[in-house]
């Protein structure tokens, strides 16, 4: 199957960050050529004259099944928010987790995200729903000490079973999720790290999200979270540390030495008023791989990576009184090629290059908010001007999953109806 995308502005995100004008040819699920005029035949042709073609974005921290929970836990203190979320989670069913997953995937697909990193329990249920949507999920089963969990059996054993049973499923990358040091003791952390290294799996963890978390852990162990994980030998290059707002320079250096990644969740952090800003300049200086995540629909209320990129950049600039921090090109890197590195797929995703998977987003070049389009301003337009509403067409691993704004892979109307019923049911159970 040859797919031809004709006559587009192509933001490649290759090593040179080349911006080309021309065609993209896809053979099956891989990119065959980029930029050159294609004179052969194609099974399907997409006229992208004047449009912008960019890599599919990679959201490195979500809880996708929580998509129906928009507005249930808004405007609460962090402790009250957690209490309410934990109660809701205890009442969830496989059906509403599956419907929630489809709703979250629909939002991401329409917004130009082709891969997301998830952390939740019941990732087997989530995986089945993700497969039906056509997007790619890096699904990290939530692990914590058995004394704190509502899961049946040991969470890490559950995680291992999930990872083994889903290791060869198309567009599903199983992984490990550590809830956080506040419920994950030394044994859990070390077993998770060992399993991650043994199998080459991504390891997503909440780290230093709040001052309470940091202070409580220091009072308990004598160390801040990253220092403690370093001391016990739990850090790994496979680790994606979500939030990472309350850090010292020593911790940043430790993370760099460990070749870790971070997932900035700027909107979620601001909405929950965690009171600190992730130290992006220091991350970059010390070799920490920086990526962007949205967090969940009940802490962010949106899974829109265009919005997240822009707000992340503005927050960094405002917090440091320095407009040069977090440039448009860096923010696009955080959302594409850096994120591909974080999940161990830099050779397959994150840029539009021959041999990589065809994860491609086409933006409407006729939209007023994206004009004028010239080579010099395309990246800035993507980061500071674009919105999810500009997304026309999305391909994930060669499959067209969104065409002219319409999701092709499943019936979203059924999901929308189910989401309202789920919201009302969960609200009533927690009145």
Image (cartoon, rainbow, N blue to C red):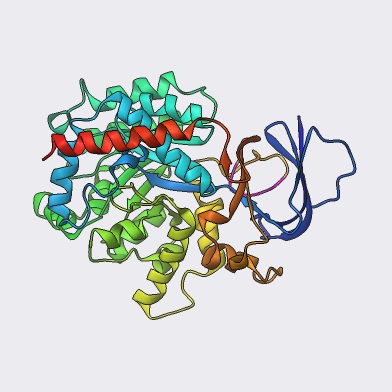
Q: Quadrant of the C terminus?
A: top left
Identity of the residue furthest to the bottom in this view? 321
Residue 50: x percent and y percent? Answer: 74, 59
Vertical comparison of 393 with 78: above or below:
above
| Up-down relation of residue 275 to residue 151 (above or below) | below
Counting from the top left corner in percent of width and height, residue 353 is at 70, 47
Name the residue furthest right: 39
Which of the pair 231/391 is nearer the observer?
A: 391
Secondary structure predominantly adopted by residues drawn in magenta: loop
Residue at 87 percent of width and 36 percent of height: 41
Residue 295 at least partly seen: yes
**Residue 5 in magenta stretch:** no
Residue 139 spot, x, y in % from top left: 41, 34
Residue range corresponding to the magenta coloring:
349-353
- The picture quadrant where one finds residue 366 is bottom right
Left or right of 419 on screen, residue 424: left
Would you identify the image quadrant in which residue 278 lies? bottom left
Is residue 139 among the parts visible in the rendering?
A: no
Assess whether residue 351 is covered by the magenta stretch: yes
Q: Residue at x 32, y 40 (%)?
A: 68
Side of 415 relative to 409 (left or right): left
Left or right of 341 in this view: 19? right
Numbered-mark total: 0
Residue 13 against residue 232 in the figure, above or below: below
- 191 to 317, vertically: above or below: above
User: In which quadrant of the rendered image does the N terminus lie?
Assistant: top right
Q: Position of residue 413 (x, y in %)?
A: 45, 34
Q: Determine whether, in the image, residue 161 is placed left or right of residue 357.
A: left
Query: Which is more toward the observer, 234 or 422?
Result: 422
């Amino acid at each position: 199957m040859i797919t031809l995308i004709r006559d587009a502005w192509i933001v490649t995100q290759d090593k040179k960050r080349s911006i080309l004008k021309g065609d993209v040819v896809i053979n099956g699920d891989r990119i065959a050529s980029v930029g050159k005029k294609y004179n052969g035949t194609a099974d399907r042709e997409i006229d992208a004259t004047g449009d912008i073609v960019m890599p599919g974005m990679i959201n490195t921290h979500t809880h996708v099944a929580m998509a129906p929970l928009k507005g249930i836990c808004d405007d609460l203190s962090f402790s009250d928010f957690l209490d309410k979320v934990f109660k809701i989670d205890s009442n969830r069913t496989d059906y509403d987790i599956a419907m929630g997953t489809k709703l979250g995937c629909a939002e991401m697909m329409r917004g130009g995200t082709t891969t997301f990193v998830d952390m939740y329990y019941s990732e087997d249920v989530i995986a089945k729903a993700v497969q039906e949507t056509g997007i790619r999920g890096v699904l990290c089963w939530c692990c914590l000490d058995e004394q704190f969990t509502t899961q049946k059996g040991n969470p890490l054993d559950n995680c291992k079973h999930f990872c083994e049973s889903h290791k060869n499923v198309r567009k599903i990358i199983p992984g490990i999720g550590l809830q956080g040091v506040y419920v994950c003791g030394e044994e859990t952390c070390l077993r998770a790290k060992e399993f991650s290294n043994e199998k080459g799996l991504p390891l997503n963890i909440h780290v230093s999200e709040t001052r309470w978390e940091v202070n409580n852990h220091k009072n308990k162990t004598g160390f801040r979270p990253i220092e403690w994980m370093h001391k016990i030998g739990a850090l790994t290059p496979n680790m994606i540390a979500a939030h990472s707002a309350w850090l010292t320079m020593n911790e940043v250096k430790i993370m760099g030495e460990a070749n870790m990644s971070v997932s900035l969740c700027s909107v979620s952090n601001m909405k929950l008023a965690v009171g600190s800003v992730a130290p992006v300049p220091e991350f970059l200086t010390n070799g920490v791989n920086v990526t962007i995540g949205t967090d969940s629909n009940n802490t962010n209320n949106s899974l829109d990576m265009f919005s997240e990129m822009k707000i992340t950049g503005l927050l960094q600039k405002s917090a440091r009184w320095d407009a040069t921090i977090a440039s448009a090109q860096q923010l696009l890197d955080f959302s594409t090629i850096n994120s591909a590195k974080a999940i161990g797929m830099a050779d397959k995703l994150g840029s539009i290059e021959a041999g990589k998977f065809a994860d491609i987003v086409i933006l409407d070049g006729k939209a007023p908010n994206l004009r004028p389009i010239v080579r010099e301003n395309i990246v800035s337009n993507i980061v500071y001007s674009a919105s999810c509403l500009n997304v026309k067409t999305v391909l994930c691993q060669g499959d067209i999953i969104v065409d002219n704004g319409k999701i092709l892979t499943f019936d979203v109307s059924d999901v929308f109806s189910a989401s309202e019923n789920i919201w009302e049911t969960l609200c009533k159970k927690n009145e």
